[in-house]
């Protein structure tokens, strides 16, 4: 008997601001730019790309491009998106 599986989507489990914050923190702790970009993509989908576009002042298309597989978001984009998400980037020692 075969086991039925489906792709796991972390976005389905990011239901609170704390969940989003912890998810992004974990991605940044890894330090892999591709993982960080993917984490922002997941968070944007969980929050709703249209709503995030409206709240950040960045078009949906630009968000998809920045956080897509070959994306390379600018610092400006990251700052606008983190503000819209209610989190902030910080440097800590």
Image (spheres, rainbow, N blue to C red):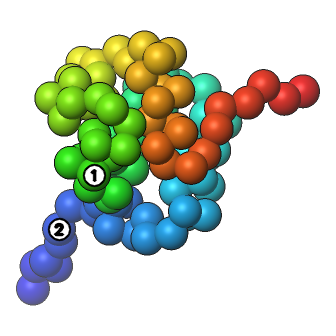
What residue is rendered at 34% in x and 57% in y? 47
Query: Residue 41 at what x, y percent from top left?
Result: 33, 40
| Element class at badge 2 | loop
What residue is rendered at 18% in x and 72% in y? 5
Give the Cα separation between the discs numbered 1 and 2: 27 Å
Query: Residue 26 at what x, y percent from top left?
Result: 61, 46
Which of 6/50 is in front? 50
Which of 20/9 is in front? 20
Which of 57/28 is in front? 57
Which residue is at the far bottom?
Answer: 1
Q: Which residue is mark 2?
A: 6
Q: Is residue 3 left or right of residue 23?
A: left
| Element class at badge 1 | helix
Please state the total of marks drawn on the protein image: 2
Question: For residue 59, what is the image quadrant?
Answer: top left
Query: Residue 74 at what x, y percent from top left?
Result: 42, 14
Residue 75 versus residue 51 in the image, above or below: above
What residue is rendered at 28% in x and 40% in y? 53
What residue is rendered at 73% in x and 30% in y? 90
- Quarter in which the C terminus is drawn: top right
Q: Which residue is mark 1?
A: 51
Q: Is residue 29 left or right of residue 65?
A: right
Q: Is residue 1 left or right of residue 60?
A: left
- Badge nearest the viewer, 1 or 2: 1
Q: Earlier in the sequence, mark 1 or mark 2?
A: 2
Question: For residue 3, what is the image quadrant?
Answer: bottom left
Residue 27 shows in the view = yes
**Mark 1 Cα shell of 10 Å, populated few (<14), some (14-19), many (≥20):** some
The tag on residue 83 is: none
């Amino acid at each position: 008997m075969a086991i039925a599986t489906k792709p796991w989507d972390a976005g389905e489990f990011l239901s609170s601001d704390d969940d989003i914050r912890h998810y992004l923190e974990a991605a940044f702790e890894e330090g892999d730019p591709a993982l960080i970009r993917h984490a922002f993509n997941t968070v944007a989908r969980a929050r709703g790309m249209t709503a995030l576009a409206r709240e950040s002042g960045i078009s949906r298309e630009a968000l998809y491009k920045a956080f897509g597989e070959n994306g390379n978001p600018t610092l400006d984009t990251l700052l606008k998106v983190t503000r819209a998400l209610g989190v902030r980037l910080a440097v800590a020692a």
